[in-house]
Image (tube, rainbow, N blue to C red):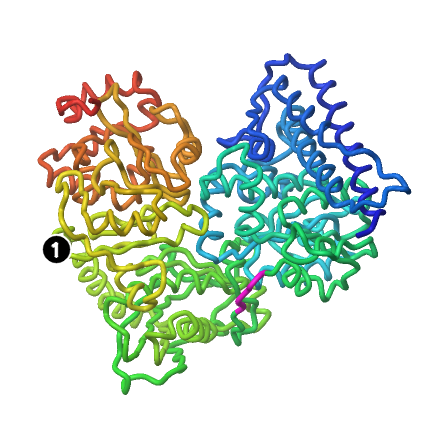
């Protein structure tokens, strides 16, 4: 390896450490040493420092220790007579630089609290381009995509391309491969983010083009995201730096693209990333580090032509990317799922309360349909004036020797994602409440309704080839036809829902596992029963049954529940045996229906977390969409940090929204009648089901008895409300002891 690149990285380390020390001393002279510092709404303090060193940084005074730690990592300057390999000193200098970049960013949050915008998407119109550190709500939401493989990794792009066209080419290619693009730093005052905006692209978490910040120090947010994933989903303990770094190398497939001149400050950042197994691919002729060792393959590769940047990056990192080539005029891939079609961009729309938009998947006989046939029954988009509305019925008929009616809702649920994957098309909702917005840009490229049928036909074949032999799609656009189709569809929806809702755990002898999240949380085993939906909210028992039949070697395996060891708590010998084996001996047993006694393990993907409120003799639950305080004294992000990673945590349990109103929800602890608090948004979302469940349990006014944040966010604040309403939890057996 080159002595020159080691020299540059070490020089950069000394420079960045000096910058951090100077800024910290200035801050200590300006503010009290007890002044709070940190990244907003995260349970992981300063995440890189915390994960690598175990040091909790909460105040300015606390920043002194990681600064001294970074100083201690700085190696001696390289001399000409030094003949030894330089990788070790380079890695140490790189880590020192990364730790100090995080200190610098923490001080920026203190000195410039409005510099970053605390939301998923920037507010370009108001000059708020940079989103800064991802909060824990974003981490949990987006972390699922790294778990299920819909996001195979991320490209950390620093600097700027020679022009906006090249920037768009590179970024869109990554989007097509479903990668996230984390952007930081500038080159001669220009940034890849500004180039994307100049090229008419949408940026933000929802399009996977994330504008972290304009300086190289903001690249530390990408590493913070990766390390928090290890702690949140993998159960890696803070300070266990060896496991953190190995976890990232093996599970978080990331790399750096350096676009522009690589100086010492970029050099130390690149050297720091090598510690994580993240290589750097540059477009300028910098010295390379080609021998393998830390990274999977090469460490630094340069110069790489812009047209080869994506392919070479994927190759060097060892990423396995599956790209679906769909014959439509628009780009296609998961990266476009979060794209918005706003008013100024809108060409036409359907559904959303303006017209009817319905989706319906039905099993067909082999001789009833023609594979690949797409029928447009009614006017197509060329008959609609710009800004107009239309009705839409999407009828998909699937035939297959292995296809069953139970698979219909699973396939139907895919329509939302697949239409959203089309660049320039936005889809919201499902079933008979769908909403589709089509952009002017998509129309200009030649998009028609037929392309929806082309996408559904191709992807159903690609993703479900075991059970799908033929797919025919009909798109209805005449209002009267759509209304007739909607009536038929609603009748089917009712039958499906009743089939699942009316099932009990006693009705079946087989439950199903879900080990999808083990890629991040190795000891977590989710068991799904008719009355215990998957804690992520994505899988019910019927879904898992169908998934197993579709993919017998997949994450959803049958579990014979076996002997009932405790009917009230929900413990089964067959489940225990499976969990012990699937967790590699880490978890010996757990209870389905209790959060107090040996509850089910929880990963980082849960929709909600329930916690005990001893002072109210009840429990609360909070969804990941709620970022406020809760009566248990912890926000959702803190709760998830405490109990995630595959642990069984008595007093807490992860669960889905739907599970709250299922018959066996914390049955062993008193069931839904124990629920004394939940966020107002979640409560309203489940209103009809809570009312119905309360009536079933003999408490018809239960919905109005449950407190929310408008009543209070402490046990002391909500207790008088519960007494006034006569909440049943107050008269139940003590939850503690």
Look at the picture and state if 73 lies above or below 122. Answer: above
The answer to whether residue 126 shows anywhere in this view is: no
Q: Is residue 517 left or right of residue 491?
A: right
Look at the picture and state if 65 lies above or below 501. Answer: above
Q: Is residue 320 left or right of residue 701?
A: right
What is the magenta range?
319-323
Residue 485: image location, x then y, percent = 27, 70
Q: Nearer the viewer, residue 436 or 624?
A: 624
Instruction: Name the outermost residue toward the bottom.
Output: 367
Tally the numbered discs.
1
Residue to which mark 1 is pinned? 507
Give the residue drawn at x 61%, y 42%: 223
Q: Main secondary structure of the magenta part?
A: loop
Give the image quarter of residue 484.
bottom left
User: Is residue 654 within the magenta segment?
Assistant: no
Q: Residues within 10 Å of mark 1 (few under 14, many from 20)?
A: few
Q: Nearer the viewer, residue 276 or 337?
A: 276
Residue 325: image location, x then y, percent = 54, 73
Can you say which quadrant of the picture contains the C terminus? top left
Q: Is residue 154 left or right of residue 637?
A: right
Instruction: Name the outermost residue toward the right.
Output: 80
Q: Nearer the viewer, residue 78 or 597?
A: 78
Give the residue drawn at x 20%, y 25%: 735
């Amino acid at each position: 390896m080159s002595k020159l690149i080691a020299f540059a990285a070490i020089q950069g380390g000394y420079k960045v450490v000096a910058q951090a020390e100077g800024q910290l001393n200035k801050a200590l002279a300006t503010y009290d040493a007890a002044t709070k510092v940190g990244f907003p709404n995260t349970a992981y303090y300063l995440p890189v420092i915390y994960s690598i060193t175990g040091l909790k940084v909460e105040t300015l005074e606390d920043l002194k220790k990681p600064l001294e730690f970074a100083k201690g990592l700085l190696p001696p300057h390289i001399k000409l007579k030094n003949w030894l390999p330089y990788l070790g000193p380079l890695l140490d200098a790189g880590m020192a630089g990364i730790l100090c970049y995080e200190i610098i960013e923490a001080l920026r949050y203190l000195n410039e609290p409005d510099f970053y915008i605390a939301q998923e998407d920037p507010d370009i119109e108001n000059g708020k381009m940079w989103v800064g550190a991802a909060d824990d709500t974003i981490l949990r939401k987006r972390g699922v995509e790294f778990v299920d493989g819909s996001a195979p990794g991320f490209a950390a792009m620093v600097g700027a391309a020679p022009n906006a066209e090249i920037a768009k080419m590179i970024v869109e290619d990554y989007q097509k491969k479903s990668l996230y693009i984390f952007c930081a730093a500038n080159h001669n005052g220009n940034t890849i983010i500004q180039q994307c905006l100049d090229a008419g692209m949408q940026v933000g978490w929802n399009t996977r083009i994330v504008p972290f910040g304009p300086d190289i120090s903001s690249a530390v947010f990408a590493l913070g995201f990766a390390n928090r994933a290890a702690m949140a989903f993998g159960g890696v303990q803070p300070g266990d730096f060896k496991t953190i770094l190995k976890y990232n190398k093996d599970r978080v497939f990331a790399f750096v693209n350096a676009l522009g001149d690589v100086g010492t400050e970029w050099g130390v950042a690149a050297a720091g990333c090598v510690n994580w197994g993240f290589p750097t691919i540059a477009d300028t002729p910098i010295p390379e580090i080609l021998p393998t060792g830390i990274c999977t393959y090469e460490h630094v590769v340069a110069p790489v032509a812009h047209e080869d940047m994506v392919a070479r990056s994927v190759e060097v990192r060892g990423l396995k990317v599956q790209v679906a080539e769909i014959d439509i005029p628009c780009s296609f891939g998961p990266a476009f799922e979060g794209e918005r079609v706003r008013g100024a961009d809108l060409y036409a729309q359907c559904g959303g309360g303006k017209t009817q938009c319905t989706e319906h998947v039905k099993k067909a006989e082999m001789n009833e349909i023609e594979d690949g046939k797409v029928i447009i029954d009614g006017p197509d988009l060329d008959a609609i004036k710009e800004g107009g509305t239309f009705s839409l019925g999407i009828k998909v008929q699937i035939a297959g020797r292995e296809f069953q009616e139970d698979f219909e809702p699973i396939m139907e649920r895919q329509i939302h994602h697949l239409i959203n994957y089309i660049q320039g098309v936005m889809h919201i909702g499902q079933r008979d409440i769908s909403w589709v917005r089509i952009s002017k840009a998509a129309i200009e490229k030649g998009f028609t309704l037929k392309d929806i049928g082309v996408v559904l036909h191709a992807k159903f074949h690609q993703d479900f080839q075991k059970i799908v032999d033929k797919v025919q799609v009909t798109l209805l656009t005449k209002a009267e036809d759509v209304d007739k189709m909607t009536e038929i569809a609603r009748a089917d929806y009712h039958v499906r829902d009743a089939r699942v809702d009316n099932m009990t755990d006693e009705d079946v002898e087989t439950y199903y596992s879900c080990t999808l999240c083990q890629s991040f949380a190795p000891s977590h085993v989710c068991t799904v029963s008719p009355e215990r939906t998957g804690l992520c909210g994505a899988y019910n028992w019927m879904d898992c049954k169908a998934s197993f039949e579709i993919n017998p070697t997949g994450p959803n395996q049958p579990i014979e529940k076996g002997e009932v060891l405790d009917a009230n708590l929900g413990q089964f010998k067959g489940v225990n045996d499976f969990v012990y084996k699937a967790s590699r001996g880490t978890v010996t047993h757990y209870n389905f229906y209790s959060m107090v006694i040996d509850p089910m393990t929880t990963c980082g993907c849960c929709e909600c977390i329930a916690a005990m409120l001893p002072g109210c003799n009840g429990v609360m639950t909070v969804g990941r969409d709620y970022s406020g305080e809760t009566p248990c004294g912890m926000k959702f992000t803190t709760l998830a940090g405490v109990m995630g990673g595959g642990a069984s945590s008595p007093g807490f349990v992860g669960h889905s929204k739907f599970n709250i109103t299922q018959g066996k929800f914390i049955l062993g602890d008193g069931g839904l009648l124990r629920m004394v608090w939940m966020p107002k948004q979640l409560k309203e979302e489940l209103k009809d089901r809570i009312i119905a469940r309360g009536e079933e349990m003999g408490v018809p006014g239960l919905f109005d008895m449950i407190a929310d944040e408008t009543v209070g966010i402490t046990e002391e604040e909500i207790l008088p409300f519960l007494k006034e309403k006569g909440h049943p939890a107050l008269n139940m057996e003590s939850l503690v002891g």
